[in-house]
Structures are given as C-alpha cells and as structure tokens.
Image (cartoon, rainbow, N blue to C red):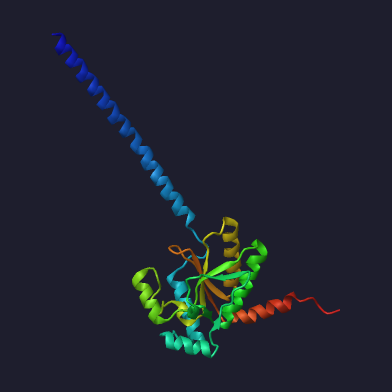
Amino acid sequence: MRHNQLRSTALTLLLITLASTHASSLHARPRTTRRTHRLSRVRHVLWNPVLRGSRESLLRQNAEIDRLQLPRISDDEELQELEQREELVPIEESDALRVAPNLPSSRRYCRPWTRDFLADFSEAYYQQFRQPVQVNSAVRTVEQQRKLRHRNGNAAPESGETASSHLAGVTVDIAKKGMNRKQHKWVQNYFLKLKNRGLIEPEEERRQAVFHVMVSDRYTDGRESSKLANQEPEK
C-alpha cells in the first residue's frame, strides 16, 4: 500500500513538472517571435537610402552614354586601345584617394571627367574627415561584366538599355564600408547636390557596400564654373 502511494506521488510530481515546462515554453515563444519581428522591422527601416538604385536610374545612365556616343568596351584589346589613346585615364592614388588592392592595374582607368570628380570628391572628404575614400571598381569590359553576372545575380546586364555604365568608363564604385553615420550622411548630401545639377547619377547599393556613381561629361564644365564663381574679384 505504501509502495503504491509513493508511485502515485512520484507520477503526480512528474506530471506537474512536465506541465510547468510546457507552459514556460509556450510563454517564451511570443517573446522570441516579437523580438524577431522587431529586428526585422529595424533592418527594414534602416535601409531607406536617399540614393536608391532603380531601373529608371539605369536608363538615365545609358541615355547619357548614348548622348556621348561612347562605346561599351567589349574586351581587353579594345580597353588597351582606349587607354593608349588616353580616352581612358589612370586613377591616381593620393592621401585622399585609395584604390582597392584587388583591382587589376588595367582596370584602374576611367574617363577624364570621372577622374576630375574623384579628385574633387576625395579631397573634399579628406578635408572634412582626414580619411581617404576608396575606389573598388572602375572601367569594365562586356566580357568581364558577363562573367561577373554569373557570380553575382545583382550585377547589371552587359547589354541592353539597362547595361552597366561601367562598360563606358564613366562610372566608379566608392566603398562605404567603415563610414560612420556622419560620414555616410555627408556623402549622401554631397552626391545629392551634384545629382540635382545633372552632373552625376549616383546609387547606393544594398548587397554591396558601395556607392555607384556615373559621372557626366558636364561635370568638368560645372567644375570650372564653380571655380570661377568662388574666385575673389581683382582689386
């Protein structure tokens, strides 16, 4: 009789323990779910760039290339010819400007007006923050872009009305990795002012930590006009 009572008491305790554990787990699940939803909502809110990329932006970039009657560079042979004729010029490093170490020397080229933009932007950023900016990518060939598309489905096509503007040498990708909030905001404002003047077409990419910036040949004229406007009148 005493043995049966002990068994009954042990079984009752076991059932109480199992019920308590089940209740605790049920109570914990909503907190986890709420936290997951909250984090998801935060990530969604954080990604709201001023310079959001779009199909319309790609169309504008290609329209500018067509206006300039620039070729989409097909292969390394055509690229070398443009570099030798100095239609593409080297991107020169300085205290204010770095080039990603993994970017091949033959790809460290762009159009002259794009280099003007890089020189001005990097110097302005350096004066503000005493840190250099970095170019991660510049001119590409159709052949290279096709290979890139195989590895990166987010890359622009190598042909068509939304083809990558890197193929004409007018575009650079500027690294945003390591920028704090203040620096990031400063870059956005700097680019937005030039975009509103029709001098650049910038996009902030999501899957890659870069600002993609296509530069119009109008940039050089705008640059010279700004310099003249800032000169002090002769006495």
Residue 148 percent location from the top left of the image: 38, 73
The residue positioned 42% from the left and 45% from the top of the image is 38
Q: Quadrant of residue 77?
A: bottom left
Residue 64 percent location from the top left of the image: 50, 81
**Is 108 placed above or below 45 here?**
below
Residue 82 percent location from the top left of the image: 50, 88
Residue 183 percent location from the top left of the image: 59, 60
- Nearer-the-camera pick, 105 or 210: 105
Left or right of 78: which side holds 196? Answer: right
Left or right of 46: which side holds 199? Answer: right
The residue positioned 45% from the left and 74% from the top of the image is 58
**Is 8 placed above or below 208 here?**
above
- Nearer-the-camera pick, 64 or 210: 210
Location of the N terminus (image quadrant):
top left
- Nearer-the-camera pick, 186 or 141: 141
| Residue ranking furthest to the top | 1
